[in-house]
């Protein structure tokens, strides 16, 4: 009798516990089923944490390690290269350098801003932002040309792979370097207008929590016989002094005339008021 | 019974957790080399906030809003009259976008032809402004304003949530920022005056509907206004590809404003005009 009572009691306890478990589970599920918005934003936390703080570039501005394989025409260009004024003052006219050079600016940080389907990179130098679409789209055959190109990205494990195409002809593209000359001990950069098929593939990954590595492969069949690859590094900073700030080119005292090739300094002193 | 049941569930949960963890939890060694994303819960929390984030926002009302004339101080009224008098004589005093600069706050928010986008992170909400390619950094970490803040075109912004309303307090503007105080004969060319030292903007953002964002803006400037000036502006959500953020580069700085002389020069690009 006692054992029967115990059995009934145990069955009752088990039934009650199953019921309670199921009911509690159902209630919790109803209350906690994340919305699409919550799922999308929550999924960001499962990605490599590019997002916290800002990244300060630590690689050389004119980084261009050898070897590089130019096309014959580009090799000839380098051999007879004479820097144009705009090459020495690439930022005249308050101009943006465009890709890839904008990523080389080391004095000011960059910050990654993730959102569903889009990763924005704010680049404090020149106060610009790159928009990397991560919603699976493809780059259209003839993207609207811009200084920073049309970018799509996807993750390969812990690496963000960004493909960019469609650039205006004014982007600042370093294609090589010459030995130091004059007072500067530094190699002299060689710039050249890019061809119609310019393309960058960047592979971004954290080597450790505080080190971001970006390996950029440059495709331009008018310049490089083989795609050229270079790797740059950024260090993470999370202090207030390193937060992103505003950047406005408010003092465009130099003016470069694309038509005449003349660079004028301090145009405000030469200009004539109407 | 409930206690037994709870104990049992705790045990089951512990066992289940141990099994799952054996499969999915990273080893301490893995944690050292590839640290787990931090602030994961804070990213999920963004999904529970009012959805300002999806798509971009366009305003349809013109940049300058004189629905109600702001009450001007005596000095401001005199300066506005002088400004409009000069304008009538054919002199253009609107230097707000010469030199490839930004008009600054609040006008930079209100360029209806180009969208804005909210990009939230756990510590700040970035508002990207396609017009002038600028980004506002609204700090959401409970800090107070710096004393005094580093002056910028967009000011130093600190935000907090009051229910479903994002409240943003902004101070610290560069002298170049001009405020519209009186409409001109051309409604697009109002009298623009330099702001005073105590200029401050408080914005209250909230969703009226899923696709309509209301911004109530209170503008404080005791040098110009005898009492705070209030504006209400609506933004409309656009989730189409045409509404996505695009690049904006000021690549044609044909006008130059000389702050020393107060003279605005035109046509530097094509040669000065008289």
Image: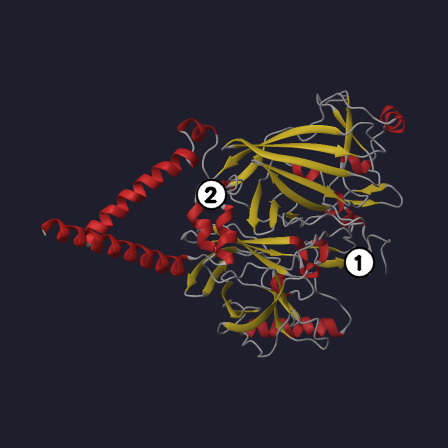
**Given the current orientation, which residue lies at the most extreme front position?**
A1
Quarter of the view holding residue A193: top right
Residue at 20% in and 49% down = B4
Q: Which residue is mark 1?
A: B266
Quarter of the view holding residue B237: bottom right
Compared with residue A159, is residue B2 higher up or lower down, i.e. above or below? below
Measured as percent of width and height from the top left, residue B117 is found at: 59, 58
Measured as percent of width and height from the top left, residue B236 is found at: 61, 68
Measured as percent of width and height from the top left, residue B21 is found at: 39, 36
Look at discs 1 and 2 and give the one toward the viewer: 2
Tell me if residue A241 can be seen.
yes
Q: Nearer the viewer, residue B184 or B41?
A: B41
Q: Pick the quarter of the image with the N terminus of chain B.
A: bottom left
Q: Under tag 1, what secondary structure?
A: loop
Q: Pick the quarter of the image with the C terminus of chain B.
A: bottom right
Q: Are marks 1 and 2 on the same chain?
A: no
Compared with residue A97, is residue A268 higher up or lower down, i.e. above or below? below
- Assess disc 2: are there few (<14), some (14-19) or many (≥20) residues with their C-alpha within 10 Å of its C-alpha: few
Q: Nearer the viewer, residue B95 or A229?
A: A229
Chain identifier of the residue bearing label 1 in the image: B
Compared with residue A72, is residue B8 higher up or lower down, i.e. above or below? below
Side of B260 where B75 appears, left or right: left
Q: Which residue is mark 2?
A: A240
Measured as percent of width and height from the top left, residue A136 is found at: 66, 48
Quarter of the view holding residue A69: top right
- Assess disc 1: are there few (<14), some (14-19) or many (≥20) residues with their C-alpha within 10 Å of its C-alpha: many
Q: Under tag 2, what secondary structure?
A: helix
Residue at 57% in and 44% down = A112
Side of A243 where A175 appears, left or right: right
Chain identifier of the residue bearing label 2 in the image: A
Tell me if residue B218 can be seen.
no
């Amino acid at each position: 009798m006692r054992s029967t009572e115990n059995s009934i009691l145990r069955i009752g306890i088990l039934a009650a516990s199953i019921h309670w478990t199921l009911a509690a589970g159902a209630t919790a599920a109803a209350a906690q089923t994340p919305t699409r918005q919550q799922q999308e934003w929550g999924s960001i936390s499962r990605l490599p944490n590019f997002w916290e703080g800002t990244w300060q570039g630590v690689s050389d501005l004119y980084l261009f390690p050898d070897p590089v394989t130019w096309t014959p025409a580009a090799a000839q260009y380098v051999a007879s290269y004479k820097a144009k004024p705009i090459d020495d003052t690439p930022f005249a006219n308050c101009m943006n350098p465009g890709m890839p050079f904008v990523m080389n600016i080391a004095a000011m940080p960059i910050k990654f801003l993730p959102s569903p389907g889009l990763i924005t990179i704010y680049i404090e130098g020149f106060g610009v932002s790159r928009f990397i679409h991560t919603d699976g789209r493809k780059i259209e055959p003839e993207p609207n040309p811009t200084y920073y190109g049309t970018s799509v990205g996807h993750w390969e494990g812990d690496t963000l792979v960004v493909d960019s195409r469609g650039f205006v002809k004014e982007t600042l593209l370093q294609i090589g370097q010459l030995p130091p000359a004059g007072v500067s001990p530094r190699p002299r950069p060689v710039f050249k207008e890019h061809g119609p098929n310019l393309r960058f593939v960047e592979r971004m990954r954290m080597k450790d929590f505080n080190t971001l590595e970006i390996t950029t492969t440059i495709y331009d069949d008018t310049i490089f016989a083989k795609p050229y690859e270079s790797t740059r590094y950024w260090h993470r900073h999370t202090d207030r002094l390193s937060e992103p700030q505003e950047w406005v080119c408010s003092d465009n005292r130099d003016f470069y005339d694309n038509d005449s090739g003349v660079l004028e300094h301090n145009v405000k002193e030469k200009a004539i008021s109407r | 019974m409930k206690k037994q049941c709870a104990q049992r569930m705790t045990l089951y949960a512990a066992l289940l957790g141990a099994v799952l963890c054996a499969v999915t939890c990273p080893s301490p060694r893995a944690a050292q080399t590839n640290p787990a994303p931090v602030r994961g819960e804070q990213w999920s929390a963004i999904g529970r906030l009012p959805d300002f984030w999806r798509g971009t926002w366009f305003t349809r009302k013109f940049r300058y809003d004189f629905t109600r004339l702001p009450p001007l101080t005596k000095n401001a009224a005199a300066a506005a009259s002088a400004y409009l008098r000069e304008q009538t004589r054919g002199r253009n005093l609107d230097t707000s976008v010469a030199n490839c600069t930004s008009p600054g706050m609040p006008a930079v928010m209100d360029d209806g032809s180009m969208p804005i986008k909210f990009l939230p992170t756990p510590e700040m909400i970035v508002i990207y402004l396609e017009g002038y390619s600028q980004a506002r950094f609204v700090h959401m970490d409970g800090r107070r304003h710096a004393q005094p803040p580093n002056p910028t075109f967009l000011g130093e912004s600190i935000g907090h949530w009051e229910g479903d309303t994002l409240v943003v307090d902004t101070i610290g503007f560069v002298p170049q920022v001009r405020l519209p105080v009186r409409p001109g004969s051309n409604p697009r060319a109002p009298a623009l005056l330099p702001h005073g030292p105590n200029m401050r903007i408080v914005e209250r953002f909230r969703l009226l509907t899923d696709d309509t964002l209301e911004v109530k803006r209170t503008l404080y400037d005791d040098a110009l206004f005898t009492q705070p000036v209030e504006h209400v502006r609506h933004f409309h959500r656009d989730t189409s590809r045409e509404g996505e953020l695009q690049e904006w580069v000021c690549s044609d700085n044909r006008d130059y404003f000389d702050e020393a002389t107060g003279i605005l020069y035109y046509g530097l690009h094509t040669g000065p005009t008289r």
